[in-house]
Amino acid sequence: MAEWTKEHVEERLIEAADVMKRLPEVRVQGYFNLWPKVIYEFADLVGQAPSRMRRPVPPPDAITRMEATLEWLRWLDGEDARLVWARAEGMRWREICTRFGIARATAHRRQEYGLCVILWRLEKRPLPKSWSRRYLTRRARALSGAR
């Protein structure tokens, strides 16, 4: 993508979390079942709870985008990366605040800062260590608003 905004970054993180949920579960290799498949008749199924339906496996291009998006989290500090990922997974603010031991306003500021760092790095701009979180957030907001 040529022009990134904070909203695009957030959408890609949410998509990556969704793709991660849809991947098949990891199984231990080397174990298999020799028993034949049980064929149920209608009378056997009466009274049973229906089996849980799973969403389809994501397409290969979505998995590739997910892998690229997960690399973005390496640009953040550990705590900020976990917070941004928790929000991308759809965790509620109250749960995030409890897990990280911070207020909601602080959690929101940290998530916004994390998205701004990713946006700034995607735009291939240098990120000076002397910049404060607030200054970077203002600069990234101006960058997104200029488009």
Image (cartoon, rainbow, N blue to C red):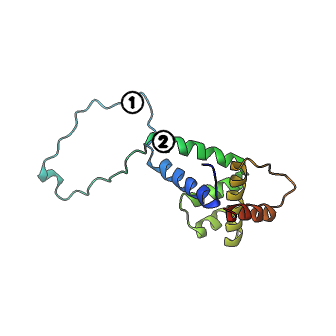
Separation of disc 2 and disc 1 at Cα? 30 Å
Q: Residue at x 72, y 53 (%)?
A: 120
Residue 31's label in the rendered image is 1
- Residue projecting furthest to the right: 130
Examine the rendered structure and indicate whether residue 91 appears above or below residue 105. Answer: above
Q: Residue at x 79, y 65 (%)?
A: 134
Residue at label 2?
61
Quarter holding the C terminus is bottom right
- Residue projecting furthest to the top: 30
In-image side of 90 versus 38 (left or right):
right
- Residue projecting furthest to the front: 147
Image coordinates of residue 53 in percent, x first then y, are 32, 53
Q: Earlier in the sequence, mark 2 or mark 1?
A: 1
Image coordinates of residue 69 in percent, x first then y, are 60, 47
Query: 10 Å neighbourhood of mark 2: few (<14), some, or many (≥20)?
Result: few
Query: 10 Å neighbourhood of mark 1: few (<14), some, or many (≥20)?
Result: few
Examine the rendered structure and indicate whether residue 69 appears above or below residue 97. Answer: above
Q: Amino acid at mark 2?
A: Asp
In-image side of 50 versus 43 (left or right):
right
Residue 56's label in the rendered image is none
